[in-house]
Amino acid sequence: MRNTIIVTVLLFIAVIGASIYYFSGLNSEKKETVKPLTFLPEETFLITAFQNDPTTDNIFKDFEIFEAILGKQETKQLQLLKSKLLRSTALQPYVEATEIYVSFHPEKDKISTLITIPTVDKIKDVDLPALLTSLEKSFKVNKQDTLGHTLFSMDYGAKDSLLYVTYVKDIFFASPSKELILLVLDNNKPKLDKAHINYFVDNNSRKAPLSVYFIHDQVKNMGSHILRSKYGKTIALFDNLGGQSAWNLNFKNDALILSGESETEHKKENYIELFSYQTKTTQSLYNYFPDNTASYLSFSISNNDRFKEDLRQLFEKRNELKTVNTLQENIQKQKGIHIGTDIGAILGSEFAVVEQSNQAELLFIRLKDKSTITSRLARLASAVTDSIQRFDQSNILYSLLGDPAKAFPRPYFTQIGDVLVLANSLQTLQEYQKDWRRANLLVGTLGFKNFEKIQGNEANITYFLRMRTSSSLIQRLLKPAYQKTLTNKDNYGYQDFFSWSFQISGNNGRFLSSIYGIFKSKAALGATPEWTYEFENRPITQPWVFQHSDTSQFIVVQEQDHTIHGIHPAGKKLWSTVFSGRVVGEAQQLDDRSIILLTDKDRLYRFDTSGKPLPGFSISLPATPTATPTIAQINNEQLIFIPAGRRMLVYDIQGKEVESWKNKTIDGQILFDIKIQEGHVYVGTDNGHFYQYDDHGKLLKEEILYSTTFKNPITVAPNSDNKSVLYTVDTDGYLYTLDFVNKPTRRKISNWDSKTRLAFESTVNRNNPLMVSLNKKELATYSVRDTSKIFGFNFTQEVTDRPQFFRNDANSVFIGVAERANSLIYLFDEKGAVVNGFPIEALPNFYYGKIDYNSGNYLLCIRRDKKLYAFKN
């Protein structure tokens, strides 16, 4: 096995900066001393423990994350060793159900692995050689005597496959490093401290599939061993903590989650110790961080008085208290303002440092009183631009917040809502202002949305490292061997991790914390398509799924050159044909399986499932269609109702215009599609004219809503008296109900603006339609009948596309929303829950549901590479 077998564990400890972790409180029962650990060298970077049993095997068998961390080659070698060695007939009775320890140790320019396996029964010295040589069918075994013990070398023929094994005090020790085995055997070499071992024994949970143990003093050693130069500010925060941590694995396919408890030596000069007597609080500053965030370190305080006193003691311990007091006294004399009272009182309990991909840093501070901050800071700062100021004195914030503000001695700052944003460079702050105005933020990225699903936002300290934007920074930090591993995409899967992060919360002098590696699983929705279909040009319609025969369905999509494609549910091309113009609205399928659609070249098409036009089609229209055609049974005849601006065109399914519906006067532009209910035809226009016709085209009633405009679709549904009524919403946010008998009524829904996108759900036959609005960044759903709000959701970017509806198996609907600016698509159920697997990266206009009669649900979507993707969910 190669020395890079566990480099990721080391990365997220030494490079990412994690050193103490906890996810949930443990009440592990006291266990007997683990004798195998007493042999481990003093310089042990990390210890992992797991049970040697089939249950553990099954848990790890399909866990993609471990292969990404260990590497494909190393994973295969471990599996081979397990099957040929641990599961061998000769050894299995001695090691079955025992706890195996894998530890990691520095050795020159590599990290060596030690496998420690206690046996359940003693193997006699005279029996050992024969037992091991019995494995020669799988391994080439040699032996030698050293330090009073017999050392076996086992070689199974592959590259780097030599494994050294010895048996001492009923324990097998195995390693690819002979030097490490000799170090274990040498009683004169320092070993792990008993206090560390006892802590591990107390906190090791045998119920967890994997336990991990870490001694905090190894942070410094690991940093110097892996990094080219001294580690940076983040890891330095955890230096000289003392103590140790023990954590356990929580199993999840798309995240590595470690949990445990940590204790420190309570060194007053360490900044982290200020939070040991705090308790976790909600952190939300990440909503302000820019999209190019490489990492952030966020702090929150539950007890401000305790924090101030502990910070004062920290300054005193560092011999800095006199300097801090002198600074505050001088400012009070010169400016007439007390930093601690006047400024500290209006700062909130949350602050964070963000490092961007260009290594520029930002400091964010939540404000307790955003209305008075400007006037108070004006006495301590000078204006640089209309919205940016700069402190006149240095180290003001350091005196109030401590270490996180030390890198910002005399920063520029601006205010955004109740948040103060600071930077050492004017340009950095101006660039951030642009990002904020454009909503170009970290929270708008797909990876961070997946991160939020897994990691909570309550803690005292959160550290977050985003792999894509920080990988080049990490590479420059690592020594060549570890840099090579990080960038190796063939053997490892570090590129499939979105982020690494940890959280810490105080716990009466100790710490509760959690660590997460968010992974892009190949099984996740949007990761591995069942198939793709490539177009020559960009697709311009959503995928439609229609019946093809009694036994199969098919998919229809139009691309930018106006070619329409018929696609088999397996992703194969059935046919393609060029139509005149772009499809307007949605295509519709008739009972005979022929398909009706309109194009913006004034054409009405009807074609069969092989893409061939029916006799008499296509037909030239006298006006340009503006929305989806409506197919309805009127007087025992199927008719096609076509909205065409200020005209309503009506044809039979043979393509002949229906005489009784000709020359209908419509005042205004028709609002989207025409509605038909119980033989009555309903039309609405943008200037407030609403019409009800009978089944022969006779106008029954026209209602006019004055002094308002309309830009959204209408719907028709039964009211509480089971009578059909028309519902429409104006640009001022009023819902109107028209029964064409009584005077129209209106109810205020919300303070929408004229750009609000609204749609009525029509995929399920219901008496109480669902109304969905998209007002800038806010999605909201309402019950039309009583206008009650069902749920709301806020996006990071303004949504400019109307919602889509997809029927599910429970006689309800899914609501599809595309956030075009971020190329993300969402799917919500009727209660507002985001459907599992969403959001994913894709462009607007997608399909969700069955693609064949007996298929499961699929997502059909388009990405920027001009391909149709089919993802099974």
Image (tube, rainbow, N blue to C red):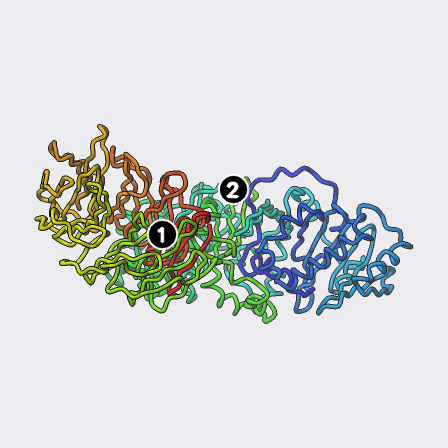
Q: Quadrant of residue 426?
A: bottom left
- Check the picture and name the quadrant holding the N terminus: bottom right
Image coordinates of residue 249 in percent, x first then y, are: 60, 48
Q: Residue furthest front?
A: 615
In this picture, is 278 found above or below 75?
above
First reached walking from the N terminus: tag 2 or tag 1: 2
Gap in angstroms between the C-alphas marked 2 and 1: 63 Å
Residue corresponding to mark 1? 546
Image coordinates of residue 373 in percent, x first then y, are: 29, 49
* 5 on left or right of 671: right
Image coordinates of residue 514 in percent, x first then y, are: 54, 48
Q: 820 or 2: which is nearer to us?
A: 820
Q: Secondary structure at mark 2?
A: loop
* Amino acid, disc 1: Phe
* 772 on left or right of 833: left
In this picture, is 783 found above or below 217?
above
Q: Quadrant of residue 41?
A: bottom right
Res. 346 in view:
no
Q: Which mark is in front, 2 or 1?
A: 1
Residue corresponding to mark 2? 277
* Amino acid, disc 2: Tyr
Q: 102 or 832: which is nearer to us?
A: 832
Instruction: Report crowding for label 1: few under 14, some 14 to 19, many 20 or more residues within 10 A (C-alpha).
Output: many
Please name the residue shown 51% across and 63% down the image.
495
* 542 on left or right of 463: left
Q: 180 or 592: which is nearer to us?
A: 592
Q: Secondary structure at mark 1?
A: strand
Image coordinates of residue 308 in percent, x first then y, are: 44, 45
Please name the residue shown 20% across and 31% down the image.
723
